Image (spheres, helix red, strand yellow):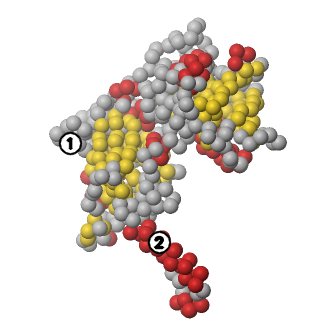
Amino acid sequence: MIPIATIGNLTRAGWAVCVVWLLGACSLQSAPPTTFKVTIANVSDLSGEDTVISTGVAITHNANLRLFEAGLPDKEMGLEGIAEDGHKWPLNAYLKRRREVFDQVIFDMPAGFDRPANIPGGKRYEFFIAASPRYPYLSLATMVGFTNDLNLMLDTDGLSGYSLYRPDGTPKSDVELKDIMNHWDVWDVGTEINEPIRVGPHQPDAPTGIDVGPPDTGLVQLYEDVRHPIDDVHEAIEVKVVNKPNAPDGTFQITVANRTDRPGLVPSALSPILAVTHGPGLSAFEQGQPDRGMGLEQLAEDGDPTRLVGNVQKHPEYYNHLVTGPGGINGSAGAVLPGASHTFEIVVDRDHPLLSMMTMYLESNDVFVTFLNRYGECGLEIYGKSDAEIAELVRRSVVFMESGTEANEEIGDGWYQGASQNEPGEGDPDSGTTRRYRKPSDPITPSDIATISIVRADSVKRRVRLRAPDGQGSRGR
């Protein structure tokens, strides 16, 4: 607010600045809602997990309301009911009283069904929900059915909610919304002690009733198995990308260091490294989707990039590539051994600003190191960025992925892993999807269970109502 005492002293230019600011603020406050279509698809039949996904609740809201915060106890809003029993009504009733909520939806009608139901593998929920610049966040909860207290939920940096809007208050495009899979995860609500998956006597499909499991004194946290020998990619692999000094713009120096010789890790060589520079239309994979058949399977299972190279070279967004490793390039490229590193150079330009990099973790069935960008695809945009900006991008983007094409064995202990198999292509097929590889002994990763996608639905109008505190009535928005 402008202090009244200063109004008389404002110059004409000052008044202009104030008018522009006020118009912008009013525009943001009065911007019409945007409707979005959300699809939650149960894909557990493809990964072999074969579980139902419960009915659930979705809201759009502002930053003053969070369904959960990572590392803190359950907020007792009703999230426990969904997490333990797929019982959505307590959470739904609680949220109806909250003025921080803009739109609220119960999703319980599977596409193609004529009555409410949980969704088995191969089925999906579809629903519409409205948001606005003042209420930009989407939060939802749906139970993973064969567990004690696990929900699929959205978060941003450990706080529930995914923003449907850009920082300037305009709604994201369909392309930008593809990054929602990067905010989708399996969360342990911490209210009931975990039992072995599928066989626990207090899980929803057991005939023991509702809310009967022993209480857990834990916190809301990602469902993890800390015994995973390559859980932290930054412990096992170091990647550094910098602008090459005294070189033409777009020339970058990349170093990949294999740190799997560290205590507690399974020592593993890395295959020869494939680096590709390209435009935004080219990606070798999409997180949460089946392998595209471009040759990623051969790289991820056998460390052989030949087929993938042939296919990316045919793509109109392709710029250049390098298969490199100790000993040389292409056919002379060798593996990067534990404790060793390899440095190489590659060039991008303004029209092809992205770098993709892939190298197989050879003590695995189909695990590879890559950059996962915010759209769930490979490719790190580095052109025109400083070394500090690139370092932060690399820190957030370098991951272990698996192609989902070969069934996993324990890391470093399998007959059909890249370092152990007698010939390429051995191993049982996996019907899963390309996904983050974090916990092989933990059977639950989000893209094994369900995928979430969201698109603009500008032609669909939803009536939403302004909430009043403590249920004291409401008026139309």
User: Residue at the spot x=58%, y=84% of the render?
Assistant: 12
Side (left or right) of 238 relative to 444: right
Side (left or right) of 267 relative to 160: right
Label drawn at residue 116: 1
Q: CA distance from mark 1 to mark 2?
A: 42 Å
Front residue of this view, candidates 168 and 475: 168
User: Residue at the spot x=26%, y=60% of the render?
Assistant: 463
Res 438 seen here: no
Q: Amino acid type of disc 1?
A: Pro
Side (left or right) of 301 relative to 172: right
Furthest residue toward left: 114
**Residue 182 in the image: above or below residue 471:** above
**Residue 350 in the image: above or below residue 329:** below
Front residue of this view, candidates 452 and 175: 175
Front residue of this view, candidates 33 and 410: 33
Sequence order check, earlier mark of 1 and 2: 2
Q: Quadrant of the C terminus?
A: bottom left
Q: Position of residue 370 (x, y in %)?
A: 60, 32
Number of numbered tags placed on the structure image? 2
Asked if marks 1 and 2 touch (Cβ < 8 Å), the reply is no
Q: Position of residue 168 (x, y in %)?
A: 50, 61
Q: Position of residue 93 (x, y in %)?
A: 27, 58
